[in-house]
Amino acid sequence: MTKSLRVKTGKIIDETYRISFKFNGKTYYGFKGDTLASALLANDVHLVGRSFKYHRPRGIMTAGSEEPNAIIQLHKNSSRTEPNVRATEVEIYEGLEASSQNCWPSVEFDIGGINNFLSPLLPAGFYYKTFMWPASFWEKYEYFIRKSAGLGKSPTEPDPDVYEHKYVHCDVLVIGSGISGIMAAKTAAKNGLQTLLVDEKPILGGSTIYQNSENFKINNQNSGSWLEKEINEIKKISNLDIKVRTSVAAYHGYNFLLARESLTDHLPIEQRKNKTRHKLLKIRAKKVICATGSIERPLIFNNNDRPGILLSSAIKRYADLFGVSCGEKNVLLTNNDSAYETAISLIQKGINIEAIIDNREEVDSKLVYEIEKNNIKIYKGFTVVDTSGYKRINKLSIMKLSKDGQKVIGSKINLPCNCLGISGGWTPAVHLFTQSGGKLKFREDDQVFIPNTHPSDQISIGSCNGDLSLEDILINVPNTLKEFLGIKKTEYENIEVLSSENFSKRNIWLLPSDKVLGKTKSFVDYQNDATAKDIKLALREGFRSIEHVKRYTTTGMGTDQGKLGNMHALGIISETAGTKMGEHGTTTFRPPYTPLTFGTIVGRNVGEYFDIFRKTPIHDWHVENKAEFENVGQWKRAWYYPKDNEDMYQAVQRESKAARESAGILDASTLGKIDIQGTDASEFLNRVYTNSWSKLAIGKCRYGLMLNEDGMVYDDGVTTRLGENHYIMTTTTGGAANVLSKLEDYLQTEWPELDVYLTSVTDHYATISVCGPNSRNIVSTIIDDLDFSDENFPHMSFKNAKIGKINCRVMRISFTGELSYEINIQANYAKSVWEKCIEAGKDFNITPYGTETMHLLRAEKGFIIVGQDTDGTMTPIDLQMDWIVSKKKYDYIGKRSLYRSDTIREDRKQLVGLLTENPDDVLEEGAQIVANINKTPIEMLGHVTSSYYSPNLKKSIALAVVKGGKNMMGEKLIIPMENKSINVTIADPIFLDKENKKLNA
Amino acid sequence: MLNYTPALLKETLIQDLQIKEISPIMKLIVRGKKREFISAVGKSLNILLPTEANTSTQSDKLTALWLSPDEWIIFSNDTMNKDLNDYETEKLLQNNISKINLGAVTDVTDQFVMINLKGNKIYDLFQSGSPYNFNNFQNKKGAVTQTILGKIDIIVHNQDKNTVNLFVRRSFSQHLFSWMNDAASRL
Amino acid sequence: MFLINCPFCGEREQSEFKAGGEAHIIRPKQPTELSDDEWAEYLFMRKNIKGVQFERWNHAHGCRKWFNVVRDTSNDEIKAVYKMGEKPPTI
């Protein structure tokens, strides 16, 4: 049986509702309202983890998101497992299972603990220094270093939970619901502003809500009760949205913030089904009020990391809020008045205090006098010089501080202690403020960094702005709000405040010990095991910049980002280097403030919604007819249609033969289509394509090649003249959006004088391409009132037509080299037209083919595919397409670049055909091409861009780019592969029907 | 006779939010810069093109949405005959605009799918995937915006309180529809 | 993610826009008259300023219009937005 340290009821604990949970396999009980940390402490469990480097036993240290030690793994070996969770933030629920991380075989006995005894051998930078050489050995070291390090285990199964994103637009965002945040939210909302108040904790009210002392009063009520009334009031305001369990992770420029709203983490697993786990709020706020509070500072002394050593404010929170005593023999170590507030709470709850050790020599404070009245021993001017107890503190030694605080004097006093509360004053939580680009200033009085200049419409109020006393808050916050919100009055004028604290503080960054520094372990960063000694070593070794010291010692580089110890690191650096704190600045605080799970970051962009897919209007037919699909940009395109267990090769061979021998049909709806209208449409085309358009007759089609200004091929396609001032341009599937955007760019910025309008009709028209010697027979069956004779409807021309009563456009154009018709039909009729083609083609063995066959057919004909045979470094001349480059036109996009010194080089890579010595050898696309394999280094001449086995030519064919290839016709080259070298001959890239007999048939 | 196949084969009702395609709706993109263009469209169709950004105008038969200073989408208020794709309005504009070079008229009837959303959670749905601030938009009948929803470009038209017309390119429509249904299931 | 005040549609989030690089680089009217070096100056040479920069932006997911933006690249503060063809403000 474990001891129970539950004392009088805590404020938010429901003792009628008992909850069982497991920690490291053992069952414990807590109450509704408990965090995992408070429930463990109530069961007298302090030891929860091992430190990162030395594997030292570590206990719960805080009661909030700043926790460096109590980092646990939830639900190990389940799909919901999550590493690196702070036990101080986990609300317990029935069935919760948690376990310690970074220890093996157990947190009680951890083999890695040997590092603690080896620690003199493991100074800062040890890994950098030791494993640097010999470099080749790193692979061997790495395995062991990685195995012994690491925080938690990532899940191995798919996450069963659902995550969402939500955009939120508000007038005012208030971050933090402590007393300042509540005042701000109420003031903003009551002045008609749409307000959002968020807090990372499950309850509102910060640390004031459990303040139940006669020493802190507002309008003659104790501050906790006063705040509670305020909270009850704001809950009724309709234009105020309140979100608890919502942690702001990032504060970007322009008041754009990301916050994680946790919706189910506090529920038993079985209640989480069909609910969203986390919502990532993408908040755009006109004004932001940071009321993020402050974090209590630890004190840095020898062996300050033992389980049982907590922040003094955490001990108070556990007692007041959860009714938990953190130990029976409590000692407080402080350099300011805060620990006395803790003492008062403990006395109220009947919890024993052994002694208070105050670094200060003399204090004139009401709080101190009250404690003295309770006969509690206060050691003034003393400090702790050492602690003992391996898995739990059991004793501490104190000594008197010298006048300058740099030494200890006198004799050592030992005190029994199983819980030590430490208080080093307060650090304003300025993390979000600095993330937003805010600059800090250093306040010498109490050694804190506070906000100085705000980069956006925002303010910091309350203790995160350095107003650490209740009095300051109640006077300053209303005034600041009035100015910030542009209002005349708040409800908080003439409020009466009683605040009994004395604000004297004796700040000593590194408390001295009777031992020399080298023999002490004074932890500055608990999570990463960086000690004061390490920081001093870094300085001795010449590091000066705080950012360098951080990386060398790893101070502040844990998942807690050094929320506790960073200030001490800075203090020790400036003290040792003899510089001023303010000059160093702080290290950069980066998002997220507390870690986010990947699920939260991706939201619903998973599975089906990972990426967008686009479908043609004929898509369902392809699915019904067992097509395999290929992703082309965002499009799902039919790739090939396997029949009777065919593989891709077999299907493509069959489809390719059928298309050339009788008829094939392709869904080409994905091609980009741009409707071009205006009196300058012809002139516009002259400027964007390399060839001339002025003389294209109405009703005719022409192929065009579009370049970038650098002369490289950008896109291609057929454009048809529909009327005097009306064209329709087709673009490649992948290039459609970019081409339209580029053309709009030229029209709007370079040639605004042109009367031209562009409208995308890509989705309006489906394109059905019927090709092959029998294509005319098929298309003419469907379109009965059109004269399909060569005279009336020659190659590269277009006709308006009707299918039934529906208007459509038919182009006689070809990407295969066969007689071919493209029907452009309004999308909602496309499936029907396609089915009619299939029906009409039955007698001609009409064969649907996909993109793979299309690629093969066009390669036989030597047609390029932009993006496959070109890669942004090919000019039309390189592609042996000189015929399409107008010599007469004065200018067009890219023209000037075609005769730069680089583009006129004879030895540029040029497009050629390749034939293999053995016609059955099919080359690999991307394979390198060389002339000589005996001379090293082997000179790479180019590579294969397209390669197929042609069923129509009954041999392997390939397109390739080869240096100076244009003048190498007939030359023999080598493609060295893994197992053999393939001999190839450079050939004409047009392998089939060079005379275009088929096209004009 | 050709069969007519709209983009979305079903309509859904999830948590009081109704999502359905309305078809066939005639849609035209009209573009022009000159003052005469706007008055010619007005005279031809008896509808004044909205010149104020993010707004719309309406006549008995037609609605016009502002898309850019020289671009509008005009669509029919009622569904058309499925068996014909000859549109009177288009012909009228071709004669009164295109032929005399005042601007451009392009049929985009099947370029865009018009999805009608009804219910009081429309804007909650939009908030789950659009960066646009709908706070003012939702109270302004006739308001128009082009933005992104679930990574897809959309045009949104506030038809009435709790009724919105959403236009999306046909090829994206099934993905968007599926995405909206998924999002709606968790509102 | 900053907000850009599109001169046509009003204030929108950055994700609706596409950046178009340095502004006020005018395409030469007579490229064929230019030497390789002069053409290269137009084609390749771009400034990359830390501080105030004049840029082109396109409201790609909105009205599709191009316009100019004056932005401080060090903190993303937008100092001015103006239409194509308008005179750049003095900043």
Image: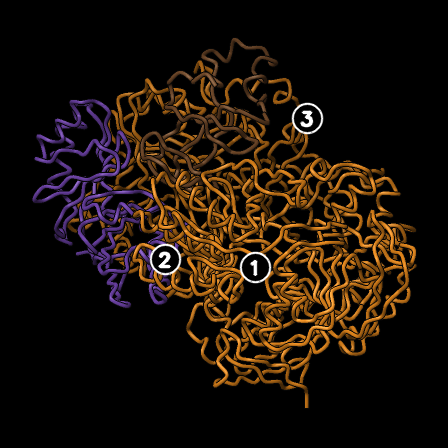
Chain colours: A orange, B purple, C brown
Reading the image, the residue beneath label 1 is A596
Q: How crowded is mark 1: few (under 14 residues within 10 Å), some or many (20 or more)?
A: some
The chain containing the residue under callout 3 comes to A
To the question of a shared chain for discs 1 and 2, the answer is yes
Q: Residues within 10 Å of mark 3 (few under 14, many from 20)?
A: some
Structural crowding at the residue carrying mark 2, measured as other residues with C-alpha within 10 Å and reported as few (<14), some (14–19) or many (≥20): some
Q: Which residue has dot 2 on it?
A: A241
Residue A934: x, y in percent?
85, 40
Choose between A833 and B110: the one closer to the eye: B110
Q: In which quarter of the image is residue A545?
A: top right
* A262 left or right of A327 in image: left
Mark 3 lies on residue: A907
For the residues labelled 3 and 2, the Cα–Cα distance comes to 68 Å
Front: mark 1 or 2: 2
Q: Earlier in the sequence, mark 1 or mark 3?
A: 1
In the rendered view, would you say A794 is above or below B175?
above
How much space separates mark 1 and mark 2, taking CA atoms? 23 Å
Q: Can residue A624 be seen in this view?
A: yes
Task: From the viewer's perspective, tell me whether residue A724 is left or right of residue A354.
Answer: left
Q: Work out whether mark 3 precedes mark 2 in sequence or the reverse, and give the earlier one.
A: 2
**SS for callout 3:** loop
Disc 1 versus disc 3: nearer the observer: 1
Q: Distance between the residues labelled 1 and 3?
A: 54 Å
Q: Position of residue A605 (x, y in %)?
A: 47, 58
Q: Quick check: A341 above or below A533?
A: below
Of the residues shown, which amino acid type is indicated by label 2? Asp
Residue in the foreground of this view, choosing between A62 and A628: A62
SS type, badge 2: strand
Quadrant of the image occupied by residue C58: top left
Marks 1 & 3, CB-CB < 8 Å contact: no
Asked if badges 3 and 2 are on one and the same chain, I answer: yes
